[in-house]
Image (cartoon, helix red, strand yellow):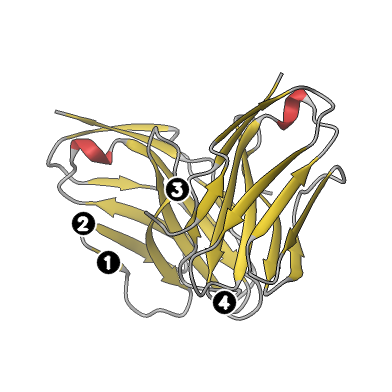
Amino acid sequence: DSGVTQTPKHLITATGQRVTLRCSPRSGDLSVYWYQQSLDQGLQFLIQYYNGEERAKGNILERFSAQQFPDLHSELNLSSLELGDSALYFCASSVTQGDTEAFFGQGTRLTVV
Amino acid sequence: AQKITQTQPGMFVQEKEAVTLDCTYDTSDPSYGLFWYKQPSSGEMIFLIYQGSYDQQNATEGRYSLNFQKARKSANLVISASQLGDSAMYFCAMREGPYNQGGKLIFGQGTELSVKP
């Protein structure tokens, strides 16, 4: 168990809908990262938050947004969902912004039908 | 250009033998970190080992060691005494920039390792 908790584990939704994925980092970790894993794109970095502030952005679509709350949990919001958004979404956390380890949650498998 | 290249999409190894998974990287930043993760069929990403660009010695963690050849920009993972439970997808990843300035990881495409009994 990495200590990073993601909910839900599985999500099936229809095109055009909006979903929220939740991540609770390991106790004491200030940095949260979101990644998307799909068959065609592989594992891609989406966005990073550090102590509540956005620190880095990757290949995140405008339809997607995220935030990190004062208690350090983070949410990734995906809207106007398309079939191509079906993927495994991971959250990772680390103590600092550039730690020697980054622990991943179990992922949320999103299926858009 | 690919920053992390894993040229072996799939590999087989006999149980109890050692196996090397290849990873080459591309960066002009003098400060970077290299990671290996294991992803079993259940989907979770398990951190295995880390090597910093300024580390003088190769990293080791139990049966895992990282063969770091800086001049060749390679960071191969060596698994000794393979076990059936080692069957999984293995990802090499790189973090660019100094320790305290961002930590996003760039991943390779992965190598699927199958351990034969």
Instruction: Say above or below: B52 vs A8.
Output: below
Three-letter amino acid code of the residue under disc 3: Met
State how far apart marks 4 and 1 are (Cα). Answer: 23 Å
CA gap, disc 2 and disc 3: 18 Å
> B101 or B21, which lies in front?
B101
**Mark 2: amino acid:** Arg
Look at 19% across and 43% down and name the residue there: B82
User: What is the CA distance from the residue labelled 3 to the residue labelled 1?
Assistant: 19 Å
Q: Is residue B46 visible?
A: yes
State the residue position of label 4. A96
Under mark 4, the amino acid is Thr
- In whole angstroms, how far apart are the C-alphas of marks 4 and 3? 19 Å
Find residue A109 and report its horizontal and vertical position in percent: 58, 34
Residues at marks 4 and 1 on the same chain: no
Residue B99 drawn above or below residue B49: below
Determine which quarter of the picture holds residue B43: top left
Side of A16 relative to B24 (left or right): right
Left or right: where B38 falls relative to B64: right
Q: Residues within 10 Å of mark 4 (few under 14, many from 20)?
A: many
Are dots 2 and 1 on a single chain?
yes
Q: Foreground mark, 2 or 3?
A: 3
**Callout 2 crowding tier (Cα within 10 Å): few <14, some 14–19, many ≥20:** few
> Left or right: where does residue A47 sit relative to residue A27?
right
Secondary structure, mark 3, is loop
- Disc 3 target residue: B45
